[in-house]
Image: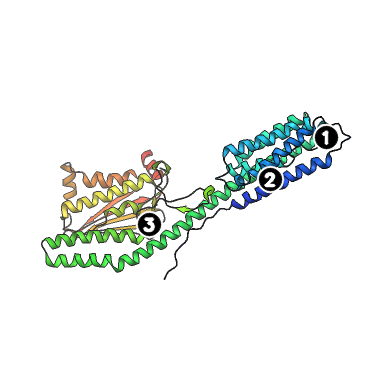
């Protein structure tokens, strides 16, 4: 019995949150110890009880908010704003609590605990949030000192650069995490598709094929049923063989643990200039009497070129049905060359009599001239039609891979 697959939570930033929680506790204790060790009752502290009250608030706040720095989801914007306010308040209260110590260039009341508040911004929102928070802290430190002393400027720049660097690393880690989640998702979807393909091939497809063959032998209504079964068999085989219908997938935000899940992407999330896999546009043409053969790998083309080429193939198949009859069979072959894509549409109809195309153009029926050749000419490509009476017709459509550049050259000519 196969083991059940389990979705695992992944978050490369989770260790950063745990480290931040430890950093806040340790630096809070360090700030209190630093003040106690520097306190001398012979010094004329203006208001030592201001420092005592502040450290009491800082002690309670640090331990009470440990769950808030357990992850990005619990670390809200409101919490970050209050946390940064407490750090700024401690900086601005330093002259009032210990003016003599400040004059000697000593540390502020929160000391390096302030950096933990800035790092929370960096881990939560990336380098932009880190730059915002560190800039405010820098302004508060400069205001508290009164003059931009060398040590103050040094510490300000250090916090500013370090927080931005950590924020940037977090953004890169999140992007890598999403890429990994998507790769794992595609791998899982591929395995599932292969399993379904095996099961369907061993059951449903064989039944549909049998119904098609038996219907053709019995004739009458059974023949119609067999024809419908054949169309469904081709469509189902196309679906499970290569996944011709593109699957829109995304990964849940890393803030929630990056759980892989399938979602529908909105239309505006699709890049209109991104290359299109030609196979996805040609797949709907496959049926009981139309066979499609394409490469196993995607066949990318610019969106406009892919749509025009698919429309030309549709026009060629319309000609097959119109002139060769509903019972005629057609074959679509997709080939990818180093600098071009070639699509061949062949049928087993009676062929086109010599001079018939010129006669049709003279009568104003321009299906081949405009719907096929005109489309390919606009793309910088070509359309070759070969027909032998009694042996069917073959249309070869060739489009350069860089169709947009080829179209521009054609227009300049």
Q: Position of residue 258 (x, y in %)?
A: 51, 52
Point out the tag, 2 or 3, that comes first from the N-terminus. 2
Spatial CA distance of label 3 from label 1 is 77 Å
Where 231 sits versus 93, above or below? below
Q: Is residue 2 left or right of residue 332?
A: right
Q: Nearer the viewer, residue 150 or 291?
A: 150
Q: Residues within 10 Å of mark 3 (few under 14, many from 20)?
A: some
The residue beneath circle 2 is 24
Q: Which mark is residue 336?
A: 3
- Which quadrant of the figure contains the N terminus? bottom left
- Determine the residue located farthest toward the left in the rendered image: 220
| Label 2 crowd (10 A; few <14 / some 14-19 / many >=20) | many
Name the secondary structure under disc 2.
helix
Q: Nearer the viewer, mark 3 or mark 1?
A: 1
Q: Residues within 10 Å of mark 1 (few under 14, many from 20)?
A: some
Pointer 3 or 1: first along the chain: 1
Callout 1 secondary element = helix
Residue at the spot x=70%, y=31% of the render? 139
Can residue 148 be spotted in the picture?
Answer: no
Residue found at x 38% / y 57%: 336
Gap in angstroms between the C-alphas marked 1 and 2? 24 Å
Task: Give coordinates of residue 287: x percent, y percent.
Answer: 24, 57
Res. 328 image quadrant: bottom left
Q: Residue at x 89, y 35 (%)?
A: 42
Q: Secondary structure at mark 3?
A: strand
Q: Is residue 119 visible?
A: yes
Please identify the residue farthest to the right as the structure is shown. 42
In whole angstroms, how far apart are the C-alphas of marks 2 and 3?
Answer: 59 Å
Mark 2 or mark 3, whichever is nearer to me:
2
Chain-order first, disc 1 or disc 2 = 2
Which residue matches tag 1? 101
């Amino acid at each position: 019995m196969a083991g059940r697959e389990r979705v695992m939570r992944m978050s490369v930033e989770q260790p950063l949150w745990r480290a931040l929680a430890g950093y806040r506790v340790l630096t809070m204790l360090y700030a209190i110890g630093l003040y106690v060790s520097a306190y001398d009752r012979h010094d004329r502290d203006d208001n030592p009880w201001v420092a005592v009250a502040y450290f009491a608030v800082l002690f309670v706040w640090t331990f009470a908010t440990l769950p808030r720095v357990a992850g990005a989801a619990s670390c809200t914007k409101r919490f970050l704003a209050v946390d940064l306010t407490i750090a700024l308040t401690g900086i601005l209260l330093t002259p009032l609590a210990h003016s003599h110590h400040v004059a000697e260039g000593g540390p502020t009341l929160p000391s390096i605990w302030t950096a933990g508040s800035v790092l929370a911004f960096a881990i939560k929102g990336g380098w932009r949030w880190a730059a915002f928070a560190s800039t405010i802290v820098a302004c508060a430190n400069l205001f508290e000192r009164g003059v931009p002393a060398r040590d103050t400027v040094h510490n300000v720049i250090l916090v500013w650069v370090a927080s931005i660097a950590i924020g940037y690393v977090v953004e890169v880690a999140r992007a890598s995490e999403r890429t990994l989640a998507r790769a794992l998702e595609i791998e899982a979807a591929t395995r599932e598709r292969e399993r379904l393909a095996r099961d369907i091939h061993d059951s449903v497809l064989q039944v549909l094929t049998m119904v098609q063959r038996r219907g053709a032998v019995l004739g009458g209504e059974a023949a119609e049923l067999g024809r419908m079964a054949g169309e469904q068999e081709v469509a189902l085989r196309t679906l499970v063989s290569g996944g011709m219908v593109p699957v829109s997938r995304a990964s849940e935000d890393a803030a929630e643990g990056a759980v892989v899940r399938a979602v529908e992407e909105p239309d505006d999330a699709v890049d209109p200039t991104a290359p299109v896999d030609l196979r996805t546009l040609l797949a709907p043409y496959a049926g009981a009497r139309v066979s499609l053969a394409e490469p196993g790998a995607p066949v990318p083309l610019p969106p406009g070129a892919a749509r025009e080429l698919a429309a030309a193939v549709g026009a060629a198949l319309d000609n097959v049905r119109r002139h060769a009859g509903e019972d005629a069979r057609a074959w679509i072959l997709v080939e990818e060359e180093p600098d071009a894509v070639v699509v061949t549409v062949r049928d087993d109809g009676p062929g086109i009599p010599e001079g018939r195309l010129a006669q049709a153009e003279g009568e104003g029926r321009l299906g081949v001239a405009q719907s096929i050749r005109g489309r390919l000419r606009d793309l910088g490509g070509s359309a070759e039609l070969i027909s032998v009476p009694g042996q069917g017709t073959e249309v070869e459509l060739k489009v350069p891979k860089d169709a947009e550049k080829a179209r521009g050259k054609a227009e300049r000519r």
